[in-house]
Amino acid sequence: MKIANIIYEKELVNHTKVDYINYLNGLIAYEEVDRSLPTLYVGWSFMKACNPNNMLFQDADVLSKRIVTNQLYWEFDFKENKALHIKGVDKFTATAPDFYFTPQYIYTNLDPVFFQIKDVNDLMDVCPKEIDSLYNYKNEMLYFLKENKIWGIDLMMYSYFQFDINDILIKIGDRTKSTISDIDGSYHQKYHKIFPNFDHLKRYLVSI
């Protein structure tokens, strides 16, 4: 699964390549890559040379590494600035999951206090009538997806307020087309090895 692009000309110094990024070596214009993925150009002069007629790049600010929020960034190559090159490439690699997942989905935490949910029927009233997919993390958290919206239910909190957790599981399950029950956490652990720095991994697993 590729969720980002890094386009570079010279060696990425002190960088360990990761499986979820497309590493593209050579003079490649932005129009030639998958622009649905967040993209990093490595090298200020190199970036301009790749995109001589693209105003996005001609208007880019050398002091700002962000060209388009969540979509397009640049970083120095090693010869231009050694310290910033190493830190910047690794930072993009670590934050690429946020750039990719966060803009695609609206997340809502169904807090029973905030939403004034008094019983299971109240909860079901604020849940979608049909759910595309459901992710159950250790019977502690439920995350479910409908189109581009993700909802979270903290079962530990609902248990504290003496909700019938089994009733919640049954009623949510009845509305769901596809369910992943990660009771031992192994499914999460599998993807945590791929995205070790992604703080919101659990909520977005339902989209994977």
Image (cartoon, rainbow, N blue to C red):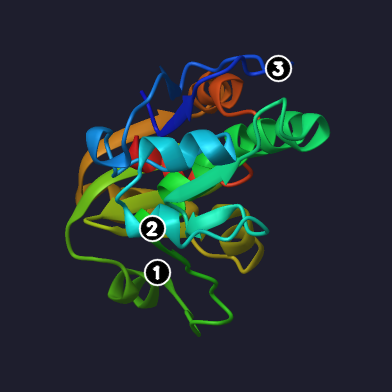
Q: Position of residue 85 (x, y in %)?
A: 71, 32
Circle 2 or circle 3, nearest the eye:
2
Mark drawn on residue 120: 1
Q: Do we see residue 139 in this rendering?
A: no
Circle 3 or circle 1, nearest the eye:
3
Do the residues under discs 3 and 1 have CB atoms within 8 angstroms? no
Mark drawn on residue 56: 2
Going from N to C along the chain, the mark reached first, 2 or 1, is 2
Instruction: Give the residue drawn at x 48%, y 69%.
Output: 110
Circle 2 or circle 1, nearest the eye:
2
Instruction: Give the residue drawn at x 47%, y 29%.
Output: 6
Task: Report the residue that reaches farthest toward the bottom.
Answer: 116
The reply, left or right, for residue 93 in relation to residue 127 is right
Label 3 element class = loop
Instruction: Give the residue drawn at x 54%, y 38%.
Output: 45
Q: Quadrant of residue 125?
A: bottom left
Q: Depth check: 82 or 194 in front?
A: 82
Residue, disc 3? 13
Q: Is residue 78 above or below residue 146?
A: above
Q: Depth check: 4 or 131 in front?
A: 4
Q: Position of residue 121 (x, y in %)?
A: 34, 73
Q: Position of residue 78 (x, y in %)?
A: 71, 25
Mark drawn on residue 200: none
Under mark 1, the amino acid is Val
Under mark 2, the amino acid is Leu
Which image quarter holds the N terminus?
Answer: top left
Residues at marks 3 and 1, CA–CA distance in whole angstroms: 54 Å
Classify mark 1: residues with Cα within 10 Å, few (<14), some (14-19) or many (20+).
some
